[in-house]
Image (tube, rainbow, N blue to C red):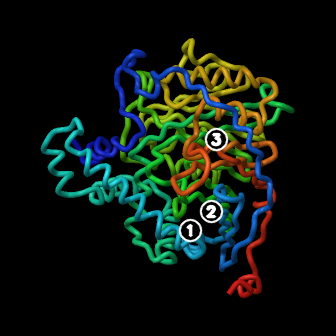
Amino acid sequence: MKLYWFTFLVLSIVKTSSAARGFSFENLGSFCKNDTPQGTPNLLPIETGAPRLIRNVENGSLYQIGVGDDQTWLVHLWGKNGYDYGFAYGTLLGEQIAQFMPKVYAYFEKEVTEKLEHLPIPESLKELIAKKGLAFALDVQNSFVEPYMDEEIYNEIRGISDAANIDYKLLVRIHMFGELTRAHCSYYGAWGKATLGGKTLQLRAFDWDMHAGLQDYPVITVYHPLSSKLGHAFTNIAWAGYIGVLSGMSSSLLGMTSIGVELPDDTFGDESMSGQPFIFVSRYILQFSETVDDALSYISNVRRTCRLIVGIADGKLNTARMIQYSHSKVSFFDDVNLQPAAEWHPTIPNIVYNGMDWLCPSYQYKLYEQLMSEYGKITAESTIENISAIVKTGDVHVAIYDLTDNILYLANGGSPNKQGPKPAYQRQFNKLDLKIEYARSQPSINEIENFH
């Protein structure tokens, strides 16, 4: 067995629930066989204040949005190459990156070390992992994906490393975690007669390990390319120093989301750790694809790696798709042929959706119920109030993309240092008009000097 496979086994322990490989309801993961989730509506007002400028640097500007404990950093980056992006990013948020990256890495390393002996793998493999350590395993993982990576990604990480004075290898290793762990999340793409006014909307509810502390360092990054090799402008919704895309929107009116799969059925293909990591497949689509058709073509042809459910919505073509994604097989679904075909996952005209996992009846059906309760009048506001909060999905963050008007609504989870409820779906949302953000100009020398 190659090392990347037992690296995958080791790191599977940081998933939010244990994997189950049987497919009867009784054998589903614990969170998927619970009683149907029933949360309370989120009635908090949406914060609509304009971003507040903090400072300018060469190729970058730093803003804040939100109030109180629901503030989020907003970073604007301009560049002719990845290094330009990274150096400006590291200059603007060096302190936050230097705090967050070692902290999150230490958390994962502790989890692996403490649970290694309980993993269901041969003793010889446990011994090798124990001797070589997590850093070794992640470096090997990087060696398998590097041939499929855009060099500008590594250049961007190098720029962050240089500006924030943080270990380059540490940053690369943390970007390998996304390939080896699976977040349980929920998604819908809705359009046409499903939404108020026929808008194209997308829900991205990110459910993961709240103990890792991602929600303490939220960052929205807006990229402004100054060279055609960097594609077009796009937005990444992530955390300090993290440049892979798990949630994001583009200036071409595309929205991206992904859901980790722990509970597949036999319609999925196999997995491989050799290929383009999915966080950079998602980024490529936001950075370069003009329509959902471009995105589906790219997914068809790229060397894929792990099992996922991918959601893409397109505000230009006014439609959305759900993708069953794996190394050896990919399938595309619309509102007519949506899978899995089950009584707990009915089709809905002009909506594609998935709740938490592939085989997850409780969340799938609850999401269906809430979508139907709002059908024909779904808005970003009704999603916040009566969909994500009632389904109880999106603890780390919840993003709603209005892809008709290119507006982002975002809430981040709480922590022991924040007042109020912990899950993001119960917290205040910030509204950000990306049309305004994409139109921002690169700071001039005078504007930079004024902040010195």
Q: Nearer the viewer, residue 295 or 169?
A: 169
Q: Earlier in the sequence, mark 3 or mark 1?
A: 1
In this view of the protein, can residue 231 be seen by the observer? no
**What's the distance in space between the residues labelled 2 and 3, CA to CA?**
36 Å
Residue 332: % across, % down: 58, 29
Number of on-image labels: 3
- Percent coordinates x, y for residue 356 in the rendering: 52, 31
Locate residue 373: give its quadrant: top right
Choose mark 3 or mark 1, whichever is in front: 3
Q: What residue would you read off at disc 3?
A: 426
SS at circle 2:
helix
Please say if 452 is above or below 427: below
Residue holding disc 1: 82
Element under disc 3: helix
Q: Specify whether 385 is left or right of 220.
A: right
* Amino acid type assigned to the residue bearing label 3 in the image: Gln
Amino acid at dot 2: Leu
> How packed is label 3: few (under 14 Cα within 10 Å), some, or many (20 or more)?
many
Up-down: is 59 above or below 303?
A: below
Tell me if I can see residue 80 in this picture: yes
Given contact means CB atoms under 8 Å apart, are the residues at marks 3 and 1 in contact?
Answer: no
Find disc 2 in the rendering and name its residue. 230
Asked which secondary structure carries label 1, the reply is: helix
Q: Residues within 10 Å of mark 1 (few under 14, many from 20)?
A: many
Earlier in the chain: of badge 1 and badge 2, it is 1
Label 2 or label 3, whichever comes before in sequence order: 2
Q: Amino acid at mark 1?
A: Gly
Cβ atoms at labels 1 and 2 below 8 Å apart: yes
How much space separates mark 1 and mark 2, taking CA atoms? 8 Å
